[in-house]
Amino acid sequence: MENFDEYLIQGEPNKAEKAKVWKTAIGLQQVDGLTPSEYLIETAKQNIEGDISIDEVKKRIENYYQQHPKKSVEDRTEEADKVSARIAEILSEQTFNFSPAEYLSIHRRLFTGIYSFAGKIREYNITKKEWALNGESVLYASAESLKETIEYDFEQERNFRYKGLNEQEIIDHISQFISNLWQIHVFGEGNTRTTAIFLIKYLRKLGFKNVNNDLFANHSWYFRNALVRANYEDLSAKIYRTNKYLIDFLSNLLLHTDFTLKNRDLHIHYDTVNTPIDTVNDTVKTQIDTVFLMIMQFPTITALEISKELNISLSSVRRKIKELKKSGKIERVGSDKSGSWRIIKR
């Protein structure tokens, strides 16, 4: 992301604004563990400089992948590049309509040619293993009720009146609306990126012009995990749904507060994960499972990044990775710096 900092420092309004948009577009790929290519970065810089239009960016990316098709199913760089360019285009537009149709339209524009169901309401039920839930899944809306559910939520929000609310009450309400919208999980894939773009556009409509979009650029995975924790509970284990993390994120986003945003705080077993390594057998197993889940969700993540996120030593992470390799669950494809993990068995 430092690729664009020079434009923000220089202070040229037009370039700085474009740089912010691109940082957000690229940062949001992290919610699915995706990393755009260097080709996309260089092409984005040409757009920031004013040398090429966003349409030209999209054409170049399209041509590039016609000439350089992906080498494996696990390679999602093309998706990261194309979706980044499309997000940059949408965020640069001064248009928005608060409606389910707009929400579906954003998904269609982002994922046409990537998913066959782009812009379509899913017709099957889903579960998703979540790192923050130690492999458990949020309960998403039933496929049979999706259309009615999303229309109901939009109608409720459309009729809501913000008049008389203080800043904190406004943020509390927005967090509840966006949490409910995400939990419906209208699409088979791409929900979080679609929801994030919709939220940014909606906040602009509500009059929040000075949105700190660096939060989406630098903490997009925290945003996803906050949505997860807002929609998961297991009363038998004394785990409760909480909007706290989403509210912290939105407060930093809109009010420029300085709440600490650490993914490890959102893990349901954070206290266990944070316990000194090798003190209890259950702790060791939890850490191995947590490292594995993080690799599953973010194939390009490095051992150093895992260490920082889980707040455990780098040597401990490497030991867990060695055990996962030995058990035949993962293998490394490419270099330690620019390669990725391949899941062999779950």
Image (tube, rainbow, N blue to C red):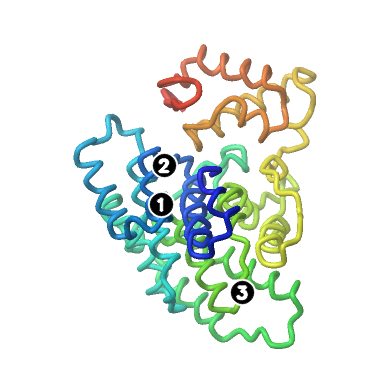
Front residue of 224/289: it is: 224
Q: Position of residue 162 (x, y in %)?
A: 66, 84
Marks 3/2 in contact by CB < 8 Å: the verdict is no
Residue 208 - label: 3
Tell me the distance, in whole angstroms, between the alpha carbons under discs 3 and 2. 29 Å
Q: Position of residue 143 (x, y in %)?
A: 40, 61
**How many marks on residues?**
3
Label 3: element kind? loop
Q: Earlier in the sequence, mark 1 or mark 2?
A: 2
Tell me the distance, in whole angstroms, between the alpha carbons under discs 1 and 2. 8 Å
Residue to which mark 2 is pinned: 36
Task: Residue at 57% x, 38% y: name it.
Answer: 135
**80, above or below 168, in the image:** above
Q: Residue 187 falls in which quadrant of the image?
A: bottom left
Badge 3 amino acid:
Phe
Q: Is residue 37 left or right of residue 247?
A: left
Judge the density around disc 3: few (<14), some (14-19), many (≥20) Cα neighbours within 10 Å.
some
Q: Position of residue 179 (x, y in %)?
A: 59, 63
Front residue of 124/116: it is: 116
Residue 75 - label: none
Front residue of 298/330: it is: 298
Q: Position of residue 26 (x, y in %)?
A: 47, 49
Question: Can you name the residue that lies furthest to the top here?
Answer: 326
Badge 2 amino acid:
Pro
Marks 1/2 in contact by CB < 8 Å: the verdict is yes
Residue to which mark 1 is pinned: 84
Task: Residue at 69% x, 42% y: name it.
Answer: 268
Label 1: element kind? helix
**202, above or below 287, in the image:** below
Judge the density around disc 2: few (<14), some (14-19), many (≥20) Cα neighbours within 10 Å.
many
Q: Earlier in the sequence, mark 3 or mark 1?
A: 1
